Amino acid sequence: MPSANYRSLLRTPGAAAFFLPASLGRVGIAMTSLSIVWLVHSSTGAFSAAGLVAGGFAVCEALGAPQLARLVDRFGQTRILRPTLLVHALAVAVLLSLVAADADVAFLVVGGGLVGGSVPQLGAMSAARWAALLRPARAAELPTAFALESISNAGAFLVGPTLVSALAAADHAVTGMVSAVSLSVFSGLFLATQRITAPPAALGGAEHAGDKGQLLCGPVLLLMGLNLAIGIFFGAMQVSVTAFAVEYGAPGAVGPIFAVSSCSGLLAGWFYGLRRWRAAPPVQLLSVTGVLSLGALLLFTVGSPFGLGLVVVLTGAAIPPLLALFPLFTESTVHQAVLTQAFAWLGAAGAAGSAAAAALSGWAIDSVGPRGGFAVTAAAAAAMTLQGLAGLRVLRTPHVRWRRRGEGPH
């Protein structure tokens, strides 16, 4: 059966023991930002204050993630993960205390920043473990492993925000925040116990120092640009779809539209990981970004929430293959000694793009309506297509270790 690809991966000794807790922890991380919004809003009654605190969270997460990942690469996941989880739990406790004390918004922003700066990078750690587990003997299975990671990520951002919204609607914003940190911390603690599959620490040796420069090479910079663009796409879509539904008098359609997009992505990611594609990954990248650009252009033609729901089926389906290709290119480019850092930098670029898009698309919507926001998404998709064209050359250069159909390094 085709699904044996996924089963064989998870039956690899130690694989399920790190993948499942990392996936559960992702749900907690996916809940955190929205939990902060509802928590602060329940206290202050102002979405402006909630947005500032959530913005502080996003900025500090984008800045802190690569630094935490650098420590992980240098000293190992187990040694860094436990103190990181402790700091994260204390940061959430500080924020909850500030909210309970009706502290000034400036202090709440600082609290949100502490939470963001200490978010455990469970996704980057899980991806690094797959690379360490499958290289070099089973390198052909890495595309399927990273597709599984993209499915996990999509599922987390479907379940997490839905759970937070349900708790907030029942006037349990504090419970949402506590649930988020509990999932992240306890899943992370279990992950830290899985020493067998943890990548070896570089320990600051000469080899580690020499490979830092790989983080500035052309393929990684290109991948950071792609992640920045996809972050802008995500951020603009969230605001634009909401504005469109409100303009058409159907605010209740927002949840179903995003649910349809997420389900489309889950199915596309599942199917993508089951196939062994004949086209080279750079060609796949260009093809998928082209589909995303087409979907973004179709947004301008919709005239109802139902029509918008049909279009987001296409845009949602294009995302998981991209999220599987990005780590595949990264793993094939950089040395294992800096792999977690590379994954974290890509995530930081995506987070920065999402944060910038929220403000940019909001301005565009206020100026010309929801289609102004769709223009931001179309520009981001077009930027990804142009970068995909560049990827045909940059991602095929000799220093990239990947070869056709997932072969091992040279």
Image: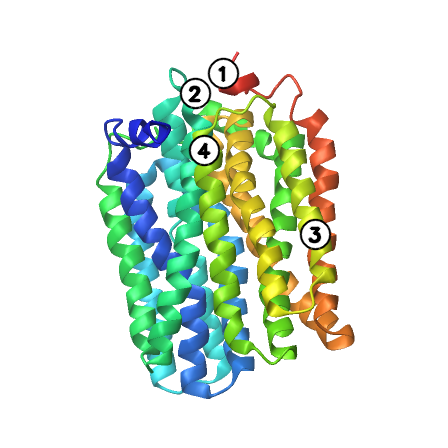
CA gap between label 4 and label 1 equals: 16 Å
Would you call the spot at circle 4 few (<14 residues within 10 Å), some (14-19), or many (20 or more)? Answer: many
CA gap between label 3 and label 4 equals: 25 Å
CA gap between label 2 and label 3 equals: 32 Å
- Secondary-structure class at tag 2: helix
Residue 48 lies, with reference to residue 278, above or below; the image says: below
Mark 4 highlights which residue? 273
Mark 2 highlights which residue? 139
* Tag 1: amino acid: Glu
Pair 2/4: label in front: 4
- Secondary-structure class at tag 4: helix
Task: Name the residue located 45 percent from the left edge and 47 percent from the top edge.
Answer: 266
Residue 380 is labelled as: 3
Tags 4 and 1 in contact by the CB under 8 Å rule?
no
Residue 237 lies, with reference to residue 333, above or below; the image says: below
Tags 2 and 1 in contact by the CB under 8 Å rule?
yes
Residue 297 lies, with reference to residue 12, above or below; the image says: below
On the image, which quarter does residue 222 sit in?
A: top right
Q: Seen from this angle, which residue lies furthest right?
A: 368
Residue 12: x %, y % from top left: 27, 26
